Image: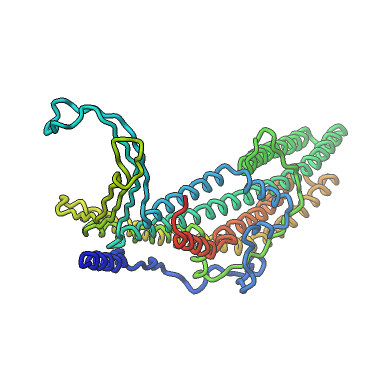
């Protein structure tokens, strides 16, 4: 009775000690966060607004801001077929499996075995008994249970690190999805911009062809010189060359979209559409909210927490470990009647291990774990600061591109007016064709610059959405963490 009380007391002490953890108290690395974004300007109301509580971007459809059904269809294909996204999903599934493996260490490990064999002993075996048979049979059936008492939190910190790694992988998956979605939206906007450029060049080629015919007619009548004809031909051929170069850019952009949606570039095609995509208004929150809306920030923060937990794992190596094991079963030299009371065997007891000298291995392990935590914290701070920069960069582009577009529209209108005047005066014989060529070049460049600014504004809005984290939030990780805790409470699964 006394021995039983001592055993129960020992188990109670072990259970009490198992509440210990040698990991440092975790604190999210500090990063300077401004009260508001610095970039603002006269164009603010045209491209972005300060978000109100109800102005959150759609979680799974932020690209619908652009109101394009074809873009929405392509985004759905990306989610279903993109190879990089499938690889990111597989990586997350691996992290989940590794987390489950670590969690299994919190529970007893149970194994069963069965063995049947015929043995022959050596005639010269040391200490062999005189009556011991040379040949005998052995049959064994048994069960073994092993459990490590987590005295210093080694197992729990390992589980915690594994769970944080899995959450980081989940955020990585969200980050990869957002990045690919933004890349697709960006390429699609570029494609639509190139369609508009090609339409403009088509119209210019048609107009320059008529101008060439006019100079040829005037040259045939002795009114214009051959130099005017050469200049008109040069302008037409140069514009045709620009058309071909733009068509090549469109083809490469279309091929890039094909890869993103998981289709062969050889059979993929998007029909040209020249309607302008309206510039959406993007709701922008204060900088502090960015820490909850960027999946890459969440991933870096969880990896920092995982590294902190591994300090506890490394420090636990300084202290003894206690294992409890039990085994029992039946063993006999005869198969018949194996499962009977006389054939029973069992063993039960604790195992106490303590490394006394290791040549500095444990000290180096703790130092490495602390350095890994510092590295993860520095990486987290760098990602946060880069995120703020990306938001500011794209706000600046939207603000200044908005002002630039107004000026460029005025320039394009003035250039077109100059071209109209030059053509009228040329028909009247008041100016040479060199003035017409100069006006044509200026008008075409002004129109192409205007279209380019429209495309750049739209691309900046896509990158702003990406910099803000799209429709993602840390609520997703909180839900995953809650499910993981429920899994631990339910215990191991087969």
Q: Position of residue 227 (x, y in %)?
A: 75, 34
Question: Is 16 in front, or is 243?
Answer: 16
Q: Position of residue 350 (x, y in %)?
A: 24, 56
**Residue 195 picture quarter:** top right
Left/right placement of residue 173 relative to residue 309 reads right
Q: Quadrant of the N terminus?
A: bottom left
Question: Is 177 in front, or is 483?
Answer: 483
Q: Is residue 125 above or below residue 413?
A: above
What residue sits 42% from the left and 58% below the top?
A: 164
What residue sits 57% from the left and 52% below the top?
A: 177
The residue sitting at the left extreme is 127
Q: Is residue 314 above or below residue 257?
A: below
- Please count the marks in the image: 0
Left/right placement of residue 161 relative to residue 212 reads left
Question: Is 358 in front, or is 247?
Answer: 358
Left/right placement of residue 405 relative to residue 342 reads right
Q: Position of residue 84 (x, y in %)?
A: 55, 44
Name the colour scheme.
rainbow
Q: Does the rendering let one see residue 331?
A: yes
Question: Is 364 in front, or is 268?
Answer: 364
What residue sits 69% from the left and 54% below the top?
A: 450
What residue sits 32% from the left and 47% below the top?
A: 341
**Residue 269 picture quarter:** top right
Q: Is residue 80 above or below residue 480?
A: above
Q: Does the rendering let one see residue 24?
A: no
The residue sitting at the top extreme is 123
Q: Position of residue 364 (x, y in %)?
A: 22, 53
């Amino acid at each position: 009775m006394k021995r039983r009380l001592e055993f129960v007391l020992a188990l109670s002490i072990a259970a009490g000690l198992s509440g210990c953890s040698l990991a440092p108290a975790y604190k999210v690395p500090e990063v300077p966060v401004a009260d508001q974004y610095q970039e603002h300007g006269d164009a603010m109301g045209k491209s972005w607004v300060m978000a109100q509580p109800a102005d959150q971007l759609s979680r799974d459809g932020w690209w619908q801001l652009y109101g394009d059904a074809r873009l929405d269809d392509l985004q759905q294909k990306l989610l279903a077929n993109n190879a990089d996204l499938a690889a990111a999903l597989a990586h997350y599934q691996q992290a989940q499996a590794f987390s489950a493996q670590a969690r299994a260490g919190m529970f007893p490990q149970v194994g069963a075995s069965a063995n049947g064999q015929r043995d022959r002993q050596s005639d010269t075996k040391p200490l062999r008994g005189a009556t011991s048979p040379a040949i005998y049979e052995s049959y064994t059936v048994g069960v073994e249970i092993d459990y490590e008492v987590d005295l210093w939190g080694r197992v729990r910190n390992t589980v915690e690190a594994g769970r944080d790694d899995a959450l980081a992988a989940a955020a990585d998956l969200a980050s990869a999805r957002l990045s690919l979605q933004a890349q697709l939206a960006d390429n699609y906007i570029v494609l639509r911009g190139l369609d508009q450029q090609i339409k403009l060049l088509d119209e210019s080629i048609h107009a320059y062809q008529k101008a060439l015919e006019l100079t040829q007619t005037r040259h045939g009548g002795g009114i214009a010189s051959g130099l005017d004809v050469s200049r008109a031909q040069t302008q037409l051929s140069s514009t045709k060359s620009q058309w071909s170069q733009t068509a090549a850019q469109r083809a490469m952009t279309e091929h890039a979209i094909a890869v993103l949606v998981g289709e062969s570039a050889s059979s993929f095609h998007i029909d040209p559409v020249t309607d302008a995509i309206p510039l959406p208004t993007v709701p922008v929150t204060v900088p502090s909210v960015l820490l909850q809306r960027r999946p890459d920030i969440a991933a870096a923060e969880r990896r920092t927490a995982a590294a902190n937990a591994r300090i506890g794992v490394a420090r636990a190596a300084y202290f003894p470990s206690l294992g409890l094991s039990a085994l029992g079963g039946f063993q006999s030299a005869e198969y018949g009647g194996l499962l009977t009371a006389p054939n029973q065997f069992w063993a039960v007891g604790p195992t106490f291990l303590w490394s006394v000298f290791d040549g500095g291995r444990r000290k180096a392990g703790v130092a490495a774990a602390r350095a890994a935590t510092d590295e993860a914290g520095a990486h987290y701070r760098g990602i946060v600061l880069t995120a703020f920069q990306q938001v500011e960069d794209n706000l600046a582009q939207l603000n200044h591109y908005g002002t630039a577009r107004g000026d460029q529209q005025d320039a394009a209108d003035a250039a077109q007016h100059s071209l109209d005047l030059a053509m009228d005066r040329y028909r009247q014989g008041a100016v040479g064709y060199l003035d017409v060529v100069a006006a044509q070049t200026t008008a075409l460049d002004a129109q192409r610059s205007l279209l380019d600014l429209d495309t750049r504004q739209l691309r900046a809005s896509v990158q702003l959405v990406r910099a803000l984290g799209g429709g993602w939030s840390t609520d997703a990780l909180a839900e995953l963490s809650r499910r993981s805790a429920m899994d631990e409470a339910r215990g191991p699964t087969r």
